Structures are given as C-alpha cells and as structure tokens.
Amino acid sequence: MQIVEISEHGISVLRGMPQIVKVLADVEDNAQDPISAENLERAKKEAELASDEVAKNFPVLHGFSVVALWSWLEHFVKGIVALWQFIDVTHWTYPSFKTTIVSVLCGVVGLYGGSIPWPKRGYP
C-alpha cells in the first residue's frame, strides 16, 4: 500500500527534526526563547518515537493498516450483501432466506445496539 510507504518515509524524516528546529532557532536568533525550547523538546520526543518505530519496522503503523483493511473488507461484504438483496429478489420467497436474513439483520442491530441511525450503518 502506497499510503503505508509514504507514512514510513514521513516518520523516518521526523528523526532529523530536532537538528532542523535547532538550526532555525539559531538563524532567527531566538534559541533562548521559551517557545523555541518547547519546540525543540517536542521535536526530540517525536524523533525518539520515530526512531523507535523505525528500529522495530513500524509495528504501530502496520497495525493501523491491518485494522483499516479489515474495516474496508467488512464494509465491502455488507455492501455486497445489501446490493445482492435488492438486485436478485428471487431468493426472497425461500423460507430459509427469510429466517437467515432476519437473524443477520438482528445481528447487525445488536452489533450497533440499535442506537445508530440507519444511514450510519453503511446501508442505503
């Protein structure tokens, strides 16, 4: 996925930010300013976190990617099932479909607790 690669490069760049912040503060002659000191401290913390991520091969980033892919897959399957129900109406007359779709819909309502309005469930 390209977005993961872009994120990896961006995180890698953060490792050099403390030096950039320090040089910019020196160029602007405000290295002793409290705001510059806060910026430098924040850049050091972010660089430390970025270095840790790079050293461990980006476990948090890859974890977020897996969760995003799983979510997309779930919504894709729900959308396909909903679309299939509206396109192919011949199966609506089968008794087994009626009980299955009722249990599936009850599961969806139970999953969302019945408190989320219909448009937010991912169905038309």
Image: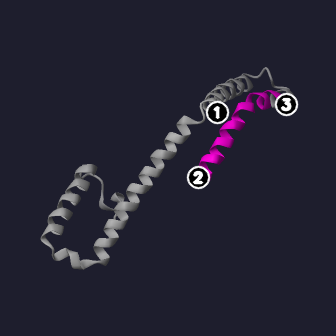
Q: Is residue 78 magenta?
A: no
Q: Amino acid at mark 2?
A: Met
Q: Is residue 43 left or right of residue 100?
A: right
Name the residue carrying label 1: 54
Mark 3 or mark 1: which comes first in sequence?
3
Q: Position of residue 22 (x, y in %)?
A: 79, 27
Q: Residue at x 59, y 30 (%)?
A: 56
Q: Earlier in the sequence, mark 2 or mark 1?
A: 2
In the image: residue 78, left or right of residue 97: right
Secondary structure beneath dot 1 equals helix
Report the Cα–Cα distance between label 3 and label 1. 31 Å
**Image location (x, y in percent) of residue 106:** 20, 56
Residue corresponding to mark 3: 28
Q: Which residue is mark 2?
A: 1
Task: For label 1, count other residues whose C-alpha is less than 10 Å away and answer few (under 14), some (14-19) or many (20+).
Answer: some
Looking at the picture, does residue 48 appear above or below residue 90?
above
Q: Quadrant of residue 96?
A: bottom left
Check disc 1 and give the amino acid type: Val
Q: Looking at the picture, which amino acid does disc 3 mark?
A: Glu
In the picture provided, is 2 more to the left or to the right than 62? right
Q: Count residues near mark 3 (Cα–Cα under 10 Å), then give few for <14, some for 14-19, many for 20+.
A: few
The mark closer to the camera, 3 or 1, is: 1
Report, in whole angstroms, how far the alpha carbon at label 3 lies from the one at label 2. Answer: 40 Å
Q: Regarding mark 2 in the picture, which secondary structure is present there?
A: loop
